[in-house]
Amino acid sequence: MSVIFFLVAALTVAGGLAAVLFKNTVHCALAVTVAFAGLALLFLSLDAQFAGFAQVLVYIGAVAILVVFAILLTRGSETPQSGVFSKSWFTGLVIAAGIFAVLGWAVMQSAHALPQQAAAPAVTVHDIGVALVGRYVLPLEIVALLLTAATIGAVIVALHEKERTQ
Amino acid sequence: MTGFASPLEAYLLVAALLFAIGLAGALTRRNAILVLIGIELMLNAANLNFIAFWRYGPHPEALTGMMFAIFSIAVAAAEAAVGLGLVISIYRHAKTTDLDQMNRMKG
């Protein structure tokens, strides 16, 4: 536990809060990018270099750009007159606060039983690569199929109606 | 220097806070894109838990936890692509992304 952890954790949580609270949708997308970057730093601080860089590539590089495109294509940057929060916002807030209370209570109660390994697991990118084409080759193929299906599905769903009926 | 019993506890609390923020965003925002952003935050909080337990837990097989997090990131990316495609499709149809106005099943 160092000062850096608290700075990065504060940055991540502030990014997440800003993404949920900002009125302008484009600002929300930028704030969630800050939260993704903070999470990547947290992964790096946990000695998970590969997951940290995958987080940067996938979330900051792809998901954030996709969100910005979706906002631009749907004119989501215009703040609606009726406010940005739904009619049932209070119920949602109570549910989220309740779930945080339960999760936080569970973590606090089990704090002394949590494992505390001092040495980081020795995993290199080479090990990950060998495992991906060795023991985990079937999940890797399934993920490849899933990504292909998701790409084709997203394109078909977002195509113009007229083009689809022709 | 801190009151935490173990470093894992601090990471788990940060993940719980991020999950609650994402859930609050998904449940309270009107814009469908921001609901998806909230869901992404929740998925990321789960990934942080995977990586934190991988780092501090006992690891007879050092790779398993890391692999789970990597596959989880890949599935989350596929989910984001399909979700945003659906939002764009609904916007073409209903001319809005306001979830409070989407109260019909029939197009």
Image (tube, rainbow, N blue to C red):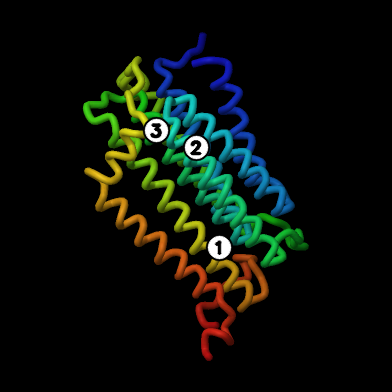
Determine whether label 1 and label 3 are within 8 Å by CB: no
Give residue A147's position: percent from left, percent from top: 41, 59
Give residue A113's position: percent from left, percent from top: 30, 20
The tag on residue A161 is none
Question: Is the residue A63 above or below the residue A50 in the image?
Answer: below
* Kind of element beneath mark 1: helix
| Residues at discs 1 and 3 both on one chain | yes
Crowding at dot 3, Cα within 10 Å, few <14 / some 14-19 / many 20+, comes out as: many
Residue at position x 45%, y 52% from top?
B76
Which residue is nearer to you in this view: A57 or B52?
A57
Crowding at dot 1, Cα within 10 Å, few <14 / some 14-19 / many 20+, comes out as: many
Residue, disc 1: B84
Q: Quadrant of residue B52?
A: top left
The chain holding disc 3 is B
Q: How many marks?
A: 3
What's the CA distance linking mark 1 and mark 2?
24 Å
The tag on residue B51 is 3
Give residue B77's position: percent from left, percent from top: 47, 53
Does the rendering let one see residue A94? no
- Looking at the image, tell me whether mark 1 or mark 3 is earlier in sequence order: 3
Instruction: Identify the residue at the far top of this view.
Output: B1
The chain holding disc 2 is A
**What's under tag 3, amino acid-wise?**
Ile
* Kind of element beneath mark 2: helix
**What's under tag 2, amino acid-wise?**
Phe
| Residues at discs 3 and 2 both on one chain | no
